[in-house]
Image (cartoon, helix red, strand yellow):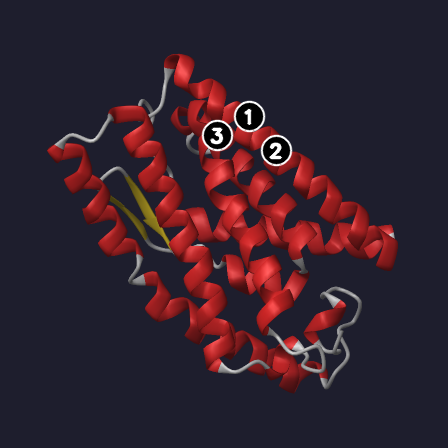
Amino acid sequence: MHIEPGVVDGAKMVFAYGTAAAAAGYSAKLVAADLARNDLPTFVIRTVLATAGVFVFFEVLPHFAVGVSEVHLILGTTLFLLLGAAPSAIGLALGLLVQGMFFAPTDLPMYFVNVTTLLVPLFAIDALAGRVVPKDTAYVDLSYTHVLKMSGVYQGGIVAWVAFWAIYGQGAGADNLNAVWTFGAAYMLVILVEPLVDLAVLAAAKTLHKGKGWGIFTDRLYYAA
């Protein structure tokens, strides 16, 4: 979902700096909460896994430009379910940064725009999970409906942020709105894929580890809250 350079520029980037700073602050809160429950080495392992996963999602999996941005299979819900909110947030931010620094330097000016677009929907599914997932249900036992809701919120949040940045940066002209619509229509197809990936990954986790996360997954993956 890399928003193209120039979509937001000049003085308008100040708002992107603010949203990214707010996202960083909320991420720090999530990190503190995670470290209160888990040791630092475990947290670092999950963060490294999240960062590597994000890099693969951006650079290895198929992606293509549509409208105002690019369509990627960003498995944000998958990262969240396996690794937890805090490592996923740090992994998304670091993975995006690594890609920009070493593989797509032209994207770096849009880093704060893109990192906001990735992180805020993650925070939304973290909040949603607390409301829709029963406290006596481990993530490996989630139903398709639960996973679909979280994936819909994450991917829908990305589309909403891309639409906001495009209109904020380039106005509401017919060509720009058409580009936004084209991107949104293409990106929402990801919702057809991600829940199936999530369920397959959760099934594999349940089968392979028999309820033991080896300390590299979030506790909620195998245990109820």
Label 1 sits on residue: 18
Residue furthest toward the left? 174
Question: Which amino acid type corresponds to the residue marked 1 in the rendered image?
Answer: Gly
Disc 3 to disc 1, C-alpha distance: 13 Å
Which comes sooner in the sequence, label 3 or label 1? 1
Label of residue 22 in the image: 2
- Above or below residue 210? Residue 112 is above
Task: Please tell me which residue lies in front, 85 or 172.
Answer: 172
Q: Nearer the viewer, residue 92 or 166?
A: 166
Q: Is residue 219 above or below residue 52?
A: below
Residue beneath label 3, please?
111
Q: Secondary structure at mark 3?
A: helix
Viewer-proximal residue among 208 and 141: 141
> Regarding mark 1 in the picture, which secondary structure is present there?
helix
Q: Is residue 36 left or right of residue 113?
A: right
Q: Earlier in the sequence, mark 3 or mark 2?
A: 2
What kind of residue is marked 2?
Ala
Question: Is 183 on the left or on the right of 12, as rendered?
Answer: left
Relative to 176, residue 160 above or below: below
Residue drawn at (42%, 51%) of the image: 157
Asked if the residue under mark 2 is in contact with the one under mark 1, i.e. CB atoms within 8 Å, the reply is yes
Q: Position of residue 56 (x, y in %)?
A: 49, 52
Estimate the spatial distance between the alpha carbons at disc 1 and disc 2, rounded to whole Å. Answer: 6 Å
Q: CA distance from mark 3 to mark 2?
A: 14 Å
